[in-house]
Amino acid sequence: MLIGVDFDNTLADYQEAFLACARERGWVGPDYAGQKRALRDLLRLRPEGDLCWQDLQGEVYGPGIGRAVLYPGAADVVRRLRSSGHGVVIVSHKTEFAGRDPTRTPLRQAALGWMTGQSFFEAEGMSLAVSDVHFCATRAEKLAKIDDLRCALFIDDLEEVLLDPGFPASIRRVLFRPDGEAHGDPSIATCRSWAEVGDLLIDADA
């Protein structure tokens, strides 16, 4: 089967990158260690908090993407999926540029550069092709691409994507949630790590 995977916060882990950038700006203390969602909610309590969060995203997904790390186990699971005969594609909601980034870093090129550095496109790495990566300007475009590719299953960290009325009904949904919060909808599987993704898709022979 063809398995679709989101990129930001599903393959690329920005948790420490967000914290480091927020600390450098003095928006949180040096000992603050909240998860990404908690950090977002905290910043939104500030005056012009939404703009603060957008500034942080513009930095982390753009010029600061080098601080991101690959989620543990992701590369191994992708390799195992491919060796088992499954196809893997990446479908990401990512605009050309961030709304608030004074450096005007091309976000898609930054992401591809990061993937290259993580051996996404090498035979000894994930052995993906650049053509397996699809960037979409809107969520609606992302959902249409998932449908057009005929994915059998899609993994995303955002439940609002999986629950969107436009999400193709025939595609199995997996919520990647490292913070441990399972989704209440029984039609959505929740995986807290890439090891659990492997258990769900490979070891269980899904």
Image (cartoon, helix red, strand yellow):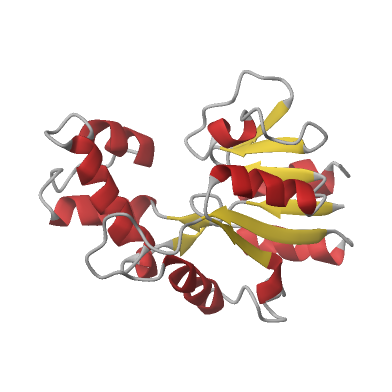
Q: Is residue 5 visible?
A: yes
The residue sitting at 60% across, 42% down in the picture is 140
Q: How many marks?
A: 0
Q: Is residue 9 left or right of residue 74?
A: left
**Quadrant for the C terminus in the image:** top right
**Left or right: where does residue 45 sit relative to residue 112?**
left
Write down the quadrant of residue 73 in the picture: bottom right
Q: In the figure, residue 184 lies in which quadrant? A: top right
Q: Residue 81: x percent and y percent? A: 80, 59
- Report x, y in % for residue 56: 26, 52
Residue with the most extreme bottom position? 123
Which residue shows up at 79% across the image and 38% down it?
Answer: 171
159 vs 52: above or below: above
- Determine whether 119 is above or below 203 in the image: below
User: Horizontally, is 6 left or right of 109 in the view?
Assistant: right
Residue 135, image x, y percentages: 58, 60
**What residue do we see at 27% from left, 42% from top?**
33
Q: Height in image: 30 above or below 66?
A: above
Residue 163 picture location, percent across and down: 62, 28
Would you say 52 lies left or right of 58 here? left
Q: Quadrant of residue 61?
A: bottom left
In terms of depth relative to the viewer, which is nearer, 166 or 62?
Answer: 166
Residue 19 appears anywhere in the view: no
